[in-house]
Amino acid sequence: MPTPPLDLPPAASENPWQAARSVDKLSIHGDVRLDGEIGVSGAKNAALPVLAATLLTEQPLRIGNLPRLKDVATTLTLLSHLGVRAQYTGASEVVTDARDVSVLRAPYELVKTMRASILVLGPLLARFGRAEVSLPGGCAIGSRPVNLHIQGLKAMGVSIDIQDGYILATTPGLRGARIVLDLVSVTGTENLMMAATLADGITVIENAAREPEIVDLAHCLGAMGAHIQGAGTDTITVEGVARLTGTHHRIIPDRIEAGTYLVAAAITGGRVKLRDTDPLLMDAVLDKLREAGASVETGRDWIELDMRGRRPKAVDLRTAPYPGFPTDMQAQFVALNSIAEGTGIITETIFENRFMHVQELQRMGANIELEGNTAIVRGVERLRGAPVMATDLRASACLAVAGLIAKGHTLIDRIYHLDRGYERLEDKLTRLGARIQRVSGGSAAEANANSGNRSTTTGSRAPMRRSG
Ligand code: UD1
């Protein structure tokens, strides 16, 4: 097994991603009923592990339906730092070539901006027997440890040291193992599944996550020559092979992006038809939207929601691993309940600190009481526009959705969170009739004053800024 030298990361001042923080804001004039048709992009949470899987082979991988997102750009930057050549061959298609990987260290500067960087750990160990990955550290929605990734890899014969905030991992060769995950972890399952593809022998992952993005990754790995059974169930069996090959893989549609636009239409009493989506991945969310009073129709690759001008009814929900209600849709449903008829009780069971959007919604006039991991949302007739601050990816989506129904002007600061996971959100919402614009830089006060003036904004049609 080749063991290339471990290179040091470039100095912070040389890191191109360091200067990439966008100070853009979103300006929304609310109280507009949405109506129209838009396409759904590829799934962020499927794209990131599939990109990491490119490290498993020397042969090129062609990845289609890749969303143009900050997290995808960050992953491509990380891969390129490791020595992977990646080239866009279409608006949403990338060809990667990991033949010349020479750096086995994922630096803190990247990992801290995107926790999913941990996904390179399993593939690097499987192919090179060594890896150094920065610990992700805390994040806005909770402590989010990686102990399950580490325990599983140890069971497969990896020695792990934690030094100066880095996971230092080495193995003379991965071997198959039976791994029982204490908690259902999506990226944990993915990391171990990828590692197991090149291990010696059979790996069984019990209490595995069942998310559709795991099934998508398993399809990609299978097309690369891996032997995987049971993806999509709670027991995944992987029989290691000697090597993997290149392939062409198309990323599945983003069920969270789709759900966000459905909530956006529902909250405004409007209608939306989504193309390029897969309703079969979204049962829990579609059921809750129907319960809220929406008429929802579906076909093989489309979903149409019509609220017919009605005010939504409040819904109770509890987040859970797939096929339960996704934690990544919790914030958007808090927004929906905030103007609904009645009181909705929303319980978050996956992340301990995932109600940061509540305070911001309260600034817009929402009536929400927090009791531990439960939000009691008493619907009010109307929200009022206000300057608000995005705190994490889905909280940003919640505020954008709330801004659509609020009376007056909402200015959302720190939308770099939003750019991590939504492709051209303002374009897509504009196509549905929303009055929404991206405002570049400047102070909140300036942006507020200029919010109606197109000459000082990038406009809703401006291309998304990419970093790295
Ligand atoms: C993934 C998704 C994220 C989603 C989350 C839950 C990606 C890139 N991100 O995140 O959008 O919100 O699933 O559906 O796919 N845990 C541990 N130890 C570990 C790993 C996880 O205690 O080693 C805990 C976490 O703190 C959390 C729970 O397990 O409480 C689930 O987290 P996990 O499924 O791992 O989330 P991610 O894979 O990071």
Image (spheres, rainbow, N blue to C red):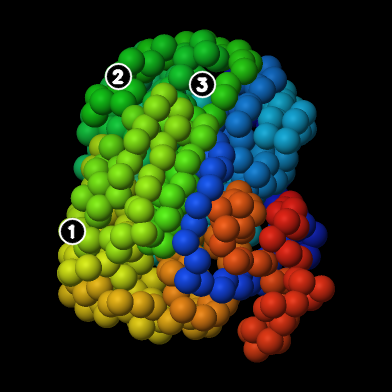
- Answer yes or no: is residue 450 visible: yes
Report crowding for label 2: few under 14, some 14 to 19, many 20 or more residues within 10 A (C-alpha). some
Quadrant where the N terminus sits is: top right
Residue ID at (75%, 57%): 462
**Residue 104 relative to residue 386: left or right:** right
Per the image, label 1 sits on a secondary structure element best described as loop
Per the image, label 2 sits on a secondary structure element best described as loop
**Residue 130 relative to residue 306: left or right:** right
What residue would you read off at disc 1?
316
Q: Amino acid at mark 1?
A: Asp
Residue 196 location (% of width, % of height): 41, 23
Residue ID at (82%, 73%): 455
Q: What is the spatial separation of the Cα atoms under label 1 and label 3, in whole angstroms? A: 36 Å
Residue ID at (68%, 87%): 449
C-beta proximity under 8 Å, tags 3 and 2 = no
Can you tell which of label 1 and label 3 is closer to the viewer?
1
What residue would you read off at disc 3?
220
On residue 230, the disc is 2
Q: Residue 242 versus residue 236: which sits nearer the camera?
A: 236
Residue 358 location (% of width, % of height): 34, 74
Q: Amino acid at mark 3?
A: Cys
Residue ID at (18%, 69%): 342
Q: Residue 436 versus residue 7: which sits nearer the camera?
A: 436
Q: Earlier in the sequence, mark 2 or mark 1?
A: 2
Q: What is the spatial separation of the Cα atoms under label 2 and label 1, in whole angstroms? A: 32 Å
